[in-house]
Image: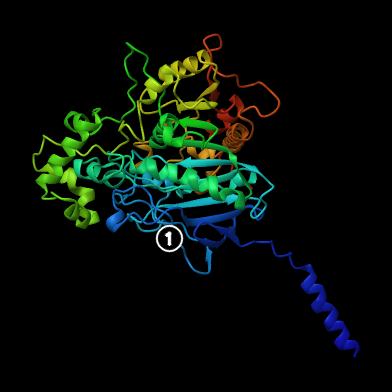
Protein backbone atom coordinates (compact mmCIF):
# COMPACT_ATOMS: atom_id res chain seq x y z
CA UNK A 1 0.00 0.00 0.00
CA UNK A 2 2.90 2.32 0.74
CA UNK A 3 4.31 1.68 -2.75
CA UNK A 4 0.91 2.34 -4.31
CA UNK A 5 0.53 5.56 -2.35
CA UNK A 6 4.04 6.68 -3.37
CA UNK A 7 3.40 6.12 -7.08
CA UNK A 8 0.02 7.84 -6.78
CA UNK A 9 1.81 10.84 -5.26
CA UNK A 10 4.33 10.90 -8.13
CA UNK A 11 1.55 10.75 -10.68
CA UNK A 12 -0.31 13.59 -8.98
CA UNK A 13 2.87 15.67 -8.74
CA UNK A 14 3.59 15.10 -12.43
CA UNK A 15 0.09 16.22 -13.36
CA UNK A 16 0.18 19.34 -11.22
CA UNK A 17 3.64 20.32 -12.47
CA UNK A 18 2.48 20.48 -16.10
CA UNK A 19 1.68 23.95 -17.52
CA UNK A 20 -1.96 24.82 -17.20
CA UNK A 21 -3.89 24.64 -20.48
CA UNK A 22 -4.49 28.06 -21.96
CA UNK A 23 -8.17 28.95 -22.19
CA UNK A 24 -8.94 28.93 -25.89
CA UNK A 25 -12.60 29.87 -26.24
CA UNK A 26 -14.82 29.08 -29.19
CA UNK A 27 -16.09 32.30 -30.75
CA UNK A 28 -19.37 32.78 -32.60
CA UNK A 29 -19.00 35.12 -35.55
CA UNK A 30 -20.62 35.77 -38.89
CA UNK A 31 -20.74 32.38 -40.63
CA UNK A 32 -20.38 30.12 -37.62
CA UNK A 33 -18.06 29.17 -34.79
CA UNK A 34 -14.29 29.52 -34.86
CA UNK A 35 -11.37 28.61 -32.62
CA UNK A 36 -7.81 29.91 -32.96
CA UNK A 37 -4.38 28.63 -32.02
CA UNK A 38 -1.65 30.16 -29.88
CA UNK A 39 1.11 32.23 -31.48
CA UNK A 40 4.61 30.79 -31.76
CA UNK A 41 6.47 33.24 -29.51
CA UNK A 42 3.67 34.58 -27.29
CA UNK A 43 1.43 31.86 -25.82
CA UNK A 44 -1.00 34.50 -24.54
CA UNK A 45 -1.58 35.73 -28.10
CA UNK A 46 -4.09 33.84 -30.22
CA UNK A 47 -4.05 33.79 -33.99
CA UNK A 48 -7.07 33.02 -36.17
CA UNK A 49 -6.00 32.15 -39.69
CA UNK A 50 -8.09 31.96 -42.82
CA UNK A 51 -11.47 33.27 -41.62
CA UNK A 52 -13.77 33.93 -44.60
CA UNK A 53 -15.20 37.45 -44.50
CA UNK A 54 -17.33 37.18 -47.67
CA UNK A 55 -18.53 34.54 -50.09
CA UNK A 56 -15.97 33.22 -52.61
CA UNK A 57 -16.09 35.67 -55.58
CA UNK A 58 -16.17 32.91 -58.18
CA UNK A 59 -18.60 31.79 -60.88
CA UNK A 60 -21.53 34.18 -61.03
CA UNK A 61 -19.93 36.27 -58.25
CA UNK A 62 -16.83 37.07 -60.33
CA UNK A 63 -16.70 40.89 -60.70
CA UNK A 64 -19.49 41.57 -58.24
CA UNK A 65 -19.50 43.35 -54.92
CA UNK A 66 -18.61 41.03 -52.02
CA UNK A 67 -21.55 38.93 -50.86
CA UNK A 68 -22.37 37.56 -47.37
CA UNK A 69 -20.09 34.85 -46.07
CA UNK A 70 -21.20 31.24 -46.61
CA UNK A 71 -21.99 29.62 -43.26
CA UNK A 72 -20.07 26.54 -42.15
CA UNK A 73 -21.03 23.72 -39.81
CA UNK A 74 -19.30 22.87 -36.56
CA UNK A 75 -16.27 24.67 -35.16
CA UNK A 76 -13.79 25.95 -37.71
CA UNK A 77 -10.25 25.50 -36.38
CA UNK A 78 -8.53 28.57 -37.79
CA UNK A 79 -5.00 27.19 -38.08
CA UNK A 80 -4.38 27.57 -41.84
CA UNK A 81 -4.09 30.79 -43.85
CA UNK A 82 -6.54 31.27 -46.73
CA UNK A 83 -5.80 31.47 -50.45
CA UNK A 84 -4.00 34.56 -51.76
CA UNK A 85 -5.67 36.17 -54.76
CA UNK A 86 -4.65 34.64 -58.08
CA UNK A 87 -1.33 36.07 -59.30
CA UNK A 88 1.87 35.17 -61.10
CA UNK A 89 4.24 32.52 -59.79
CA UNK A 90 7.03 33.98 -57.66
CA UNK A 91 10.51 32.87 -58.68
CA UNK A 92 13.64 33.01 -56.47
CA UNK A 93 15.55 36.27 -56.27
CA UNK A 94 14.67 39.81 -55.23
CA UNK A 95 11.55 40.18 -53.13
CA UNK A 96 10.63 36.50 -53.40
CA UNK A 97 13.76 35.39 -51.56
CA UNK A 98 13.69 38.41 -49.26
CA UNK A 99 10.27 37.46 -47.92
CA UNK A 100 10.77 33.70 -47.97
CA UNK A 101 7.69 32.84 -50.01
CA UNK A 102 6.82 29.19 -50.51
CA UNK A 103 4.57 28.02 -47.67
CA UNK A 104 1.46 29.96 -48.65
CA UNK A 105 -1.81 28.38 -49.79
CA UNK A 106 -2.36 28.00 -53.56
CA UNK A 107 -3.37 31.17 -55.41
CA UNK A 108 -7.08 31.32 -56.19
CA UNK A 109 -9.96 33.61 -57.07
CA UNK A 110 -11.45 32.24 -53.84
CA UNK A 111 -9.38 34.62 -51.74
CA UNK A 112 -11.57 36.63 -49.36
CA UNK A 113 -10.01 35.55 -46.09
CA UNK A 114 -8.66 37.43 -43.09
CA UNK A 115 -6.47 36.70 -40.08
CA UNK A 116 -6.70 37.98 -36.52
CA UNK A 117 -4.10 38.22 -33.73
CA UNK A 118 -5.40 39.03 -30.24
CA UNK A 119 -4.78 38.64 -26.51
CA UNK A 120 -8.44 38.86 -25.56
CA UNK A 121 -10.66 36.35 -27.39
CA UNK A 122 -14.23 36.30 -26.09
CA UNK A 123 -13.58 39.32 -23.86
CA UNK A 124 -15.97 41.86 -25.28
CA UNK A 125 -15.25 44.33 -22.50
CA UNK A 126 -11.49 44.42 -23.31
CA UNK A 127 -12.06 46.94 -26.10
CA UNK A 128 -8.53 46.69 -27.46
CA UNK A 129 -7.63 48.99 -30.38
CA UNK A 130 -7.86 47.38 -33.81
CA UNK A 131 -5.50 47.72 -36.79
CA UNK A 132 -6.41 46.53 -40.29
CA UNK A 133 -3.33 45.74 -42.40
CA UNK A 134 -3.65 46.03 -46.21
CA UNK A 135 -0.78 44.43 -48.12
CA UNK A 136 0.95 45.92 -51.15
CA UNK A 137 2.11 44.40 -54.42
CA UNK A 138 1.09 46.79 -57.17
CA UNK A 139 -2.57 45.69 -56.94
CA UNK A 140 -1.37 42.56 -58.77
CA UNK A 141 0.32 40.38 -56.13
CA UNK A 142 0.84 39.83 -52.42
CA UNK A 143 -1.22 38.48 -49.53
CA UNK A 144 -1.88 39.33 -45.91
CA UNK A 145 -0.05 36.36 -44.40
CA UNK A 146 3.40 36.94 -45.90
CA UNK A 147 6.16 36.15 -43.37
CA UNK A 148 7.07 39.79 -42.87
CA UNK A 149 3.46 40.49 -41.80
CA UNK A 150 3.55 38.09 -38.83
CA UNK A 151 1.16 39.83 -36.43
CA UNK A 152 2.02 38.22 -33.11
CA UNK A 153 4.18 41.13 -31.91
CA UNK A 154 1.28 43.50 -32.57
CA UNK A 155 -0.98 41.21 -30.56
CA UNK A 156 1.60 41.26 -27.78
CA UNK A 157 1.34 45.07 -27.78
CA UNK A 158 -2.36 44.75 -26.86
CA UNK A 159 -3.59 45.53 -30.37
CA UNK A 160 -6.03 43.34 -32.28
CA UNK A 161 -4.35 43.04 -35.67
CA UNK A 162 -6.37 42.00 -38.74
CA UNK A 163 -4.73 41.24 -42.09
CA UNK A 164 -6.65 40.46 -45.26
CA UNK A 165 -6.45 39.09 -48.76
CA UNK A 166 -8.41 40.93 -51.43
CA UNK A 167 -8.99 40.57 -55.18
CA UNK A 168 -6.09 41.63 -57.34
CA UNK A 169 -5.35 42.37 -60.99
CA UNK A 170 -8.07 41.77 -63.53
CA UNK A 171 -10.24 40.07 -60.88
CA UNK A 172 -10.07 43.04 -58.55
CA UNK A 173 -10.13 46.06 -60.84
CA UNK A 174 -11.64 45.28 -64.27
CA UNK A 175 -13.93 48.00 -65.63
CA UNK A 176 -16.24 47.05 -68.50
CA UNK A 177 -19.50 48.45 -69.93
CA UNK A 178 -21.35 45.14 -69.49
CA UNK A 179 -20.34 44.90 -65.85
CA UNK A 180 -21.44 48.48 -65.28
CA UNK A 181 -24.77 47.81 -66.97
CA UNK A 182 -25.62 44.96 -64.60
CA UNK A 183 -24.54 46.87 -61.48
CA UNK A 184 -27.26 48.71 -59.54
CA UNK A 185 -24.75 51.57 -59.22
CA UNK A 186 -23.95 51.73 -62.93
CA UNK A 187 -20.19 51.25 -62.41
CA UNK A 188 -17.58 48.49 -62.43
CA UNK A 189 -14.05 47.96 -61.15
CA UNK A 190 -12.73 48.73 -57.65
CA UNK A 191 -13.74 45.24 -56.49
CA UNK A 192 -10.52 44.96 -54.49
CA UNK A 193 -11.38 48.20 -52.68
CA UNK A 194 -14.91 46.94 -52.04
CA UNK A 195 -13.34 43.82 -50.50
CA UNK A 196 -11.35 46.05 -48.13
CA UNK A 197 -14.52 47.94 -47.20
CA UNK A 198 -16.25 44.60 -46.60
CA UNK A 199 -13.40 43.66 -44.23
CA UNK A 200 -14.02 46.92 -42.35
CA UNK A 201 -17.70 46.03 -42.11
CA UNK A 202 -16.73 42.56 -40.84
CA UNK A 203 -14.60 44.22 -38.16
CA UNK A 204 -17.52 46.45 -37.15
CA UNK A 205 -19.79 43.40 -36.70
CA UNK A 206 -17.40 40.78 -35.34
CA UNK A 207 -14.24 42.21 -33.76
CA UNK A 208 -15.71 42.53 -30.25
CA UNK A 209 -15.67 38.71 -30.13
CA UNK A 210 -11.88 38.98 -30.37
CA UNK A 211 -11.68 41.64 -27.66
CA UNK A 212 -11.43 44.50 -30.15
CA UNK A 213 -13.13 47.89 -30.09
CA UNK A 214 -15.10 48.42 -33.34
CA UNK A 215 -15.05 52.17 -32.66
CA UNK A 216 -11.23 52.36 -32.52
CA UNK A 217 -9.95 51.07 -35.85
CA UNK A 218 -6.81 52.09 -37.74
CA UNK A 219 -6.22 51.25 -41.39
CA UNK A 220 -2.62 50.93 -42.54
CA UNK A 221 -0.86 49.66 -45.62
CA UNK A 222 2.33 49.89 -47.65
CA UNK A 223 2.92 50.53 -51.37
CA UNK A 224 -0.30 49.50 -53.14
CA UNK A 225 -1.67 48.88 -49.66
CA UNK A 226 -0.90 52.54 -48.92
CA UNK A 227 -2.63 53.45 -52.18
CA UNK A 228 -5.61 51.45 -50.95
CA UNK A 229 -5.57 53.37 -47.67
CA UNK A 230 -5.58 56.62 -49.64
CA UNK A 231 -8.60 55.43 -51.64
CA UNK A 232 -10.41 54.39 -48.45
CA UNK A 233 -9.69 57.78 -46.90
CA UNK A 234 -11.38 59.43 -49.86
CA UNK A 235 -14.22 56.92 -50.36
CA UNK A 236 -17.64 57.82 -48.93
CA UNK A 237 -18.36 54.08 -48.56
CA UNK A 238 -15.57 53.64 -45.99
CA UNK A 239 -16.37 56.75 -43.96
CA UNK A 240 -16.91 56.04 -40.26
CA UNK A 241 -15.43 52.54 -40.32
CA UNK A 242 -11.96 53.71 -39.21
CA UNK A 243 -10.58 56.43 -36.97
CA UNK A 244 -6.87 56.63 -37.98
CA UNK A 245 -4.77 55.95 -41.06
CA UNK A 246 -1.12 55.08 -41.79
CA UNK A 247 0.27 55.50 -45.33
CA UNK A 248 3.61 53.74 -45.89
CA UNK A 249 5.54 54.29 -49.14
CA UNK A 250 2.46 55.43 -51.00
CA UNK A 251 3.57 59.00 -51.62
CA UNK A 252 1.76 62.13 -50.55
CA UNK A 253 0.07 64.67 -52.81
CA UNK A 254 1.16 66.67 -55.84
CA UNK A 255 0.56 70.34 -55.26
CA UNK A 256 -0.77 72.34 -58.22
CA UNK A 257 2.07 73.14 -60.59
CA UNK A 258 4.49 70.67 -58.99
CA UNK A 259 6.12 67.73 -60.71
CA UNK A 260 4.67 64.40 -59.49
CA UNK A 261 6.86 62.10 -57.42
CA UNK A 262 8.37 59.25 -59.42
CA UNK A 263 6.99 56.29 -57.45
CA UNK A 264 7.34 53.60 -60.08
CA UNK A 265 10.23 51.30 -60.89
CA UNK A 266 11.85 51.76 -64.28
CA UNK A 267 10.29 49.81 -67.13
CA UNK A 268 10.05 50.12 -70.91
CA UNK A 269 8.32 53.33 -71.85
CA UNK A 270 5.67 51.57 -73.94
CA UNK A 271 4.66 49.38 -71.00
CA UNK A 272 4.69 52.32 -68.62
CA UNK A 273 2.43 54.28 -70.96
CA UNK A 274 -0.10 51.46 -71.11
CA UNK A 275 -0.10 50.27 -67.52
CA UNK A 276 0.29 53.40 -65.44
CA UNK A 277 -1.20 56.27 -67.41
CA UNK A 278 -4.18 57.82 -65.70
CA UNK A 279 -7.49 56.95 -67.33
CA UNK A 280 -10.94 58.31 -66.70
CA UNK A 281 -13.60 55.76 -65.86
CA UNK A 282 -15.08 56.01 -69.36
CA UNK A 283 -11.65 55.54 -70.96
CA UNK A 284 -10.85 52.56 -68.74
CA UNK A 285 -14.14 50.86 -69.67
CA UNK A 286 -13.68 51.47 -73.38
CA UNK A 287 -10.08 50.26 -73.48
CA UNK A 288 -10.79 47.12 -71.44
CA UNK A 289 -13.66 46.30 -73.81
CA UNK A 290 -11.23 46.44 -76.74
CA UNK A 291 -9.01 43.82 -75.09
CA UNK A 292 -11.86 41.50 -74.11
CA UNK A 293 -13.55 41.81 -77.50
CA UNK A 294 -10.22 40.90 -79.13
CA UNK A 295 -10.22 37.75 -77.00
CA UNK A 296 -13.80 36.87 -77.96
CA UNK A 297 -15.19 37.65 -74.51
CA UNK A 298 -18.12 39.63 -75.84
CA UNK A 299 -20.81 38.91 -73.23
CA UNK A 300 -21.01 38.35 -69.49
CA UNK A 301 -21.51 34.60 -69.79
CA UNK A 302 -18.28 34.23 -71.77
CA UNK A 303 -16.44 36.58 -69.41
CA UNK A 304 -17.46 34.60 -66.34
CA UNK A 305 -16.86 31.25 -68.01
CA UNK A 306 -13.30 32.11 -69.05
CA UNK A 307 -10.57 30.34 -67.11
CA UNK A 308 -8.72 32.06 -64.31
CA UNK A 309 -5.38 31.54 -66.02
CA UNK A 310 -6.54 32.97 -69.33
CA UNK A 311 -8.03 36.09 -67.78
CA UNK A 312 -4.95 36.68 -65.68
CA UNK A 313 -2.69 36.54 -68.76
CA UNK A 314 -5.03 38.28 -71.19
CA UNK A 315 -3.63 41.82 -71.03
CA UNK A 316 -0.07 40.56 -71.52
CA UNK A 317 -1.12 38.29 -74.39
CA UNK A 318 -2.92 41.18 -76.08
CA UNK A 319 0.09 43.48 -75.89
CA UNK A 320 2.53 40.72 -76.85
CA UNK A 321 0.47 40.13 -79.99
CA UNK A 322 0.86 43.76 -80.99
CA UNK A 323 -2.31 45.18 -79.51
CA UNK A 324 -1.93 48.88 -78.69
CA UNK A 325 -5.47 50.27 -78.68
CA UNK A 326 -6.65 48.84 -75.38
CA UNK A 327 -5.44 48.11 -71.87
CA UNK A 328 -6.89 46.58 -68.72
CA UNK A 329 -6.14 49.22 -66.08
CA UNK A 330 -5.78 47.04 -62.99
CA UNK A 331 -5.84 49.60 -60.20
CA UNK A 332 -8.37 51.74 -58.31
CA UNK A 333 -10.18 54.32 -60.35
CA UNK A 334 -12.49 57.28 -59.70
CA UNK A 335 -15.84 55.73 -60.61
CA UNK A 336 -18.40 58.02 -58.96
CA UNK A 337 -19.47 55.34 -56.48
CA UNK A 338 -16.56 53.84 -54.55
CA UNK A 339 -14.35 56.83 -55.32
CA UNK A 340 -15.63 60.32 -56.06
CA UNK A 341 -12.33 62.12 -56.64
CA UNK A 342 -8.60 61.64 -56.33
CA UNK A 343 -6.84 61.53 -52.97
CA UNK A 344 -4.96 64.70 -53.93
CA UNK A 345 -8.14 66.60 -54.70
CA UNK A 346 -9.89 65.34 -51.57
CA UNK A 347 -6.91 66.49 -49.49
CA UNK A 348 -6.90 69.95 -51.06
CA UNK A 349 -10.66 70.52 -50.92
CA UNK A 350 -10.99 69.18 -47.37
CA UNK A 351 -13.28 66.23 -48.11
CA UNK A 352 -10.70 63.62 -47.05
CA UNK A 353 -11.48 61.58 -43.93
CA UNK A 354 -10.79 63.90 -41.00
CA UNK A 355 -8.63 61.51 -38.97
CA UNK A 356 -5.03 61.55 -37.66
CA UNK A 357 -2.44 60.33 -40.18
CA UNK A 358 1.04 58.85 -40.13
CA UNK A 359 2.76 58.93 -43.51
CA UNK A 360 6.27 58.17 -44.71
CA UNK A 361 8.69 56.38 -46.99
CA UNK A 362 12.09 54.69 -47.12
CA UNK A 363 15.35 56.43 -47.95
CA UNK A 364 15.82 54.47 -51.19
CA UNK A 365 12.17 54.16 -52.10
CA UNK A 366 10.59 54.11 -55.56
CA UNK A 367 11.46 57.72 -56.19
CA UNK A 368 11.59 60.74 -53.91
CA UNK A 369 8.30 60.85 -52.03
CA UNK A 370 9.39 63.34 -49.40
CA UNK A 371 8.09 66.51 -51.03
CA UNK A 372 4.59 65.19 -51.63
CA UNK A 373 4.43 63.78 -48.10
CA UNK A 374 5.47 67.11 -46.58
CA UNK A 375 2.86 68.89 -48.71
CA UNK A 376 0.17 66.50 -47.49
CA UNK A 377 1.08 67.10 -43.85
CA UNK A 378 1.10 70.88 -44.31
CA UNK A 379 -2.32 70.85 -45.96
CA UNK A 380 -3.72 68.67 -43.18
CA UNK A 381 -2.32 71.10 -40.60
CA UNK A 382 -3.88 74.06 -42.42
CA UNK A 383 -7.24 72.30 -42.23
CA UNK A 384 -6.90 71.59 -38.52
CA UNK A 385 -5.68 68.02 -38.77
CA UNK A 386 -2.51 66.23 -37.66
CA UNK A 387 -0.10 64.18 -39.72
CA UNK A 388 3.19 62.71 -38.54
CA UNK A 389 5.85 62.21 -41.25
CA UNK A 390 8.78 59.78 -41.21
CA UNK A 391 11.64 58.40 -43.26
CA UNK A 392 13.10 54.92 -42.76
CA UNK A 393 16.84 55.24 -43.32
CA UNK A 394 18.42 52.00 -42.10
CA UNK A 395 20.29 50.27 -44.99
CA UNK A 396 19.51 46.60 -44.45
CA UNK A 397 22.54 44.50 -43.39
CA UNK A 398 23.97 42.00 -45.88
CA UNK A 399 26.31 39.06 -45.23
CA UNK A 400 26.73 38.21 -48.91
CA UNK A 401 24.74 35.00 -48.70
CA UNK A 402 22.01 36.14 -51.09
CA UNK A 403 23.53 38.13 -53.97
CA UNK A 404 20.42 37.34 -56.05
CA UNK A 405 18.51 39.55 -53.60
CA UNK A 406 20.95 42.33 -52.95
CA UNK A 407 21.69 42.82 -56.63
CA UNK A 408 18.21 44.35 -56.81
CA UNK A 409 17.38 45.41 -53.26
CA UNK A 410 19.94 47.78 -51.83
CA UNK A 411 20.05 50.12 -48.86
CA UNK A 412 16.78 51.17 -47.24
CA UNK A 413 14.85 49.90 -50.24
CA UNK A 414 11.12 49.98 -50.95
CA UNK A 415 9.43 47.67 -48.41
CA UNK A 416 12.54 47.21 -46.23
CA UNK A 417 10.79 48.85 -43.28
CA UNK A 418 8.20 46.06 -43.08
CA UNK A 419 10.52 43.78 -41.10
CA UNK A 420 10.77 46.52 -38.48
CA UNK A 421 7.15 47.66 -38.29
CA UNK A 422 6.02 44.08 -37.62
CA UNK A 423 9.13 43.11 -35.62
CA UNK A 424 9.24 40.00 -37.80
CA UNK A 425 13.02 39.95 -38.28
CA UNK A 426 13.26 36.32 -37.16
CA UNK A 427 11.74 35.24 -40.50
CA UNK A 428 14.53 36.87 -42.52
CA UNK A 429 17.99 35.60 -43.54
CA UNK A 430 19.72 38.92 -42.91
CA UNK A 431 22.42 39.27 -40.19
CA UNK A 432 20.49 41.53 -37.86
CA UNK A 433 22.32 43.38 -35.12
CA UNK A 434 21.03 44.22 -31.66
CA UNK A 435 20.51 47.71 -33.05
CA UNK A 436 18.08 46.32 -35.63
CA UNK A 437 16.03 44.61 -32.95
CA UNK A 438 16.02 47.79 -30.89
CA UNK A 439 15.02 49.90 -33.90
CA UNK A 440 12.22 47.46 -34.66
CA UNK A 441 10.93 47.67 -31.11
CA UNK A 442 11.03 51.46 -31.33
CA UNK A 443 9.09 51.54 -34.58
CA UNK A 444 6.52 48.97 -33.47
CA UNK A 445 5.98 51.01 -30.30
CA UNK A 446 5.40 54.20 -32.30
CA UNK A 447 3.00 52.46 -34.68
CA UNK A 448 1.04 50.70 -31.93
CA UNK A 449 0.92 53.90 -29.85
CA UNK A 450 -0.65 55.66 -32.81
CA UNK A 451 -3.25 52.90 -33.07
CA UNK A 452 -4.00 53.12 -29.35
CA UNK A 453 -3.84 56.86 -28.70
CA UNK A 454 -3.97 58.67 -32.07
CA UNK A 455 -0.43 59.83 -31.31
CA UNK A 456 2.77 57.85 -31.95
CA UNK A 457 4.27 59.25 -28.73
CA UNK A 458 1.58 57.64 -26.60
CA UNK A 459 -0.04 59.41 -23.66
CA UNK A 460 3.20 61.14 -22.72
CA UNK A 461 6.17 62.52 -24.61
CA UNK A 462 6.60 64.72 -27.64
CA UNK A 463 9.69 63.33 -29.37
CA UNK A 464 7.83 63.06 -32.67
CA UNK A 465 5.89 66.20 -33.58
CA UNK A 466 3.33 66.44 -36.39
CA UNK A 467 4.75 68.05 -39.52
CA UNK A 468 3.58 71.61 -40.11
CA UNK A 469 4.78 74.64 -42.02
CA UNK A 470 6.43 75.83 -38.80
CA UNK A 471 7.87 72.39 -37.92
CA UNK A 472 8.73 70.76 -41.26
CA UNK A 473 10.68 67.84 -39.78
CA UNK A 474 10.44 64.14 -40.52
CA UNK A 475 11.14 61.50 -37.87
CA UNK A 476 14.12 59.56 -39.25
CA UNK A 477 14.43 55.90 -38.25
CA UNK A 478 18.01 54.64 -38.33
CA UNK A 479 20.59 52.98 -36.10
CA UNK A 480 22.53 55.12 -33.68
CA UNK A 481 26.26 55.61 -34.32
CA UNK A 482 27.40 52.76 -32.07
CA UNK A 483 25.04 50.21 -33.58
CA UNK A 484 25.88 51.40 -37.09
CA UNK A 485 29.59 50.91 -36.34
CA UNK A 486 29.00 47.38 -35.00
CA UNK A 487 26.96 46.56 -38.10
CA UNK A 488 29.70 47.85 -40.40
CA UNK A 489 32.21 45.63 -38.56
CA UNK A 490 30.09 42.60 -39.38
CA UNK A 491 28.87 41.69 -35.92
CA UNK A 492 25.40 40.19 -36.38
CA UNK A 493 23.45 39.69 -33.17
CA UNK A 494 20.44 37.43 -33.22
CA UNK A 495 17.71 37.88 -30.63
CA UNK A 496 17.91 35.32 -27.82
Query: How is the rendered protein coloured?
Result: rainbow
Q: Secondary structure at mark 1?
A: loop
Instruction: Report the residue at 64% width, 21% height from top.
Output: 463
The answer, for residue 180, to whether it is visible in the render is yes
Instruction: Report the residue at 61% width, 53% height from top.
Output: 209
Position above or below: 202 against 3: above
Instruction: Report the residue at 43% width, 42% height from top.
Output: 197
The residue lying furthest to the front in this view is 184
Image quarter in which the N terminus is found? bottom right
Foreground pick, 430 / 181: 181
Q: In screen coordinates, is 146 left or right of 89?
A: right
Instruction: Report the residue at 60% width, 19% height from top.
Output: 465
Foreground pick, 243 / 469: 243
The residue labelled by disc 1 is 70
What percent of the width, then of the height, locates residue 364?
A: 41, 27
Position above or below: 169 against 265: below
Q: In screen coordinates, is 66 left or right of 490?
A: left
Specify the quadrant of the image occupied by residue 308: bottom left
What percent of the width, then of the height, locates residue 339?
A: 36, 32
What percent of the width, then of the height, locates residue 458?
A: 66, 29
Foreground pick, 164 / 21: 164
Amino acid sequence: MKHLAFFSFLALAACTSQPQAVDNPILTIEGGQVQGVTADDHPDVFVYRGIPYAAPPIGELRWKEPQPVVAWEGVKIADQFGHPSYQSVHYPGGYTTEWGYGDEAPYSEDCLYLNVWTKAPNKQDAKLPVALWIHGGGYREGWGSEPEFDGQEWGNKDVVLVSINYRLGVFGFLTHPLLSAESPHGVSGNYGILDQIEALKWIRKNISQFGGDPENVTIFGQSAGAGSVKTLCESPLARGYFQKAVIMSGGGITMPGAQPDNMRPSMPQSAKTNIFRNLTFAEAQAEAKIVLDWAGLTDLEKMRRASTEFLYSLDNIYRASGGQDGVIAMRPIVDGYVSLESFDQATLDGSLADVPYMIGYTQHDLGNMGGGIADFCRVRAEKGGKAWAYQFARPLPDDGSHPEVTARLKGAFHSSDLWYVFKSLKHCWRPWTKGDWDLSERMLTYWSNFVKYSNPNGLEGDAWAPLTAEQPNFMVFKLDAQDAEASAMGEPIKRE
